[in-house]
Image (cartoon, rainbow, N blue to C red):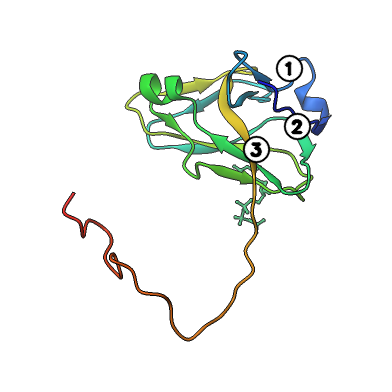
Amino acid sequence: MSNIMNVRILRLPHSEGLDLPAYGTAGAAGVDFQAAVEAPLSLKPGERTLVPTGLCIALPEGYELQIRPRSGLALKHGIMVPNSPGTIDEDYRGEIRIILINAGTEEFVIERGMRIAQGVLAPVVRMQWQECSSLDTTDRGHGGFGSTGH
Ligand SMILES: O=c1ccn([C@H]2C[C@H](O)[C@@H](COP(=O)(O)OP(=O)(O)OP(=O)(O)O)O2)c(=O)[nH]1
């Protein structure tokens, strides 16, 4: 991929020894974040938790980082990111933390260094409201939520 941006990243002490989030293949869209837990963290079915990454970043202006689940963990263990895609704002300087929920049927143990979720850099277009008294008409109109029958 030729589309590459520099992003400043700061390691906190508890991420020592872990890798910086990396792309798994030459064409991967997301970098994998590792769990910076000090000890294995057990997640029972139905439980959710906040997993530290030990990393802080400063995104380029006009970008967000989206935190998304990994399909393998979702399929094999039911491990999901309930707020997916999680939003890391360009002005956030705190530690990136990842919310995980065990939607599976068995206990899941998060080990230090486990790749738990992925982050995709995405451009953001901000809105400027133009308040008005009416909107243009369309075929769809107010129809939604299954109104087309599919
Ligand atoms: O999965 C996530 C989601 C968010 N954040 C951090 C970065 C983000 O910039 C900040 C705020 O996130 P969000 O706007 O989703 O949270 P909120 O619930 O609206 O809280 P706030 O009032 O702090 O904006 O929290 C994470 O570390 N992980």
Circles 3 and 2, Cβ within 8 Å, touching? The answer is no
Query: In the rendered structure, which disc, 1 or 2, sits on the residue that comes first in sequence?
Result: 1
Label 3's element? strand
> Marks 3/2: CA distance?
8 Å
Q: State the residue position of label 1.
A: 18
The numbered disc on residue 55 is 2
Q: What residue type is labelled 2?
A: Leu
Circles 3 and 1, Cβ within 8 Å, touching? The answer is no
Residue 112 location (% of width, % of height): 64, 18
Judge from the rendering whether residue 140 lies leftward or rightward of residue 41; answer left or right. left
Q: In which quarter of the image is residue 107?
A: top left
Query: In the rendered structure, which disc, 3 or 1, sits on the residue that comes first in sequence?
Result: 1
Q: Nearer the viewer, residue 132 or 81?
A: 132
Judge from the rendering whether residue 57 lies leftward or rightward of residue 1; answer left or right. right
User: Residue at (78%, 42%) from the top-left corner?
Assistant: 60
In the rendered image, the quadrant that contains the N terminus is: top right
User: Residue at (41%, 75%) from the top-left corner?
Assistant: 136
Q: Nearer the viewer, residue 49 or 60?
A: 60
Q: State the residue position of label 3.
A: 97
> Marks 3/1: CA distance?
15 Å
Label 2 crowd (10 A; few <14 / some 14-19 / many >=20)? many
Q: Mark 1 CB in 8 Å range of ligand 1?
A: no
Residue 83 location (% of width, % of height): 50, 45
Residue at the far bottom in the pictured view: 133
Residue 103 location (% of width, % of height): 37, 33
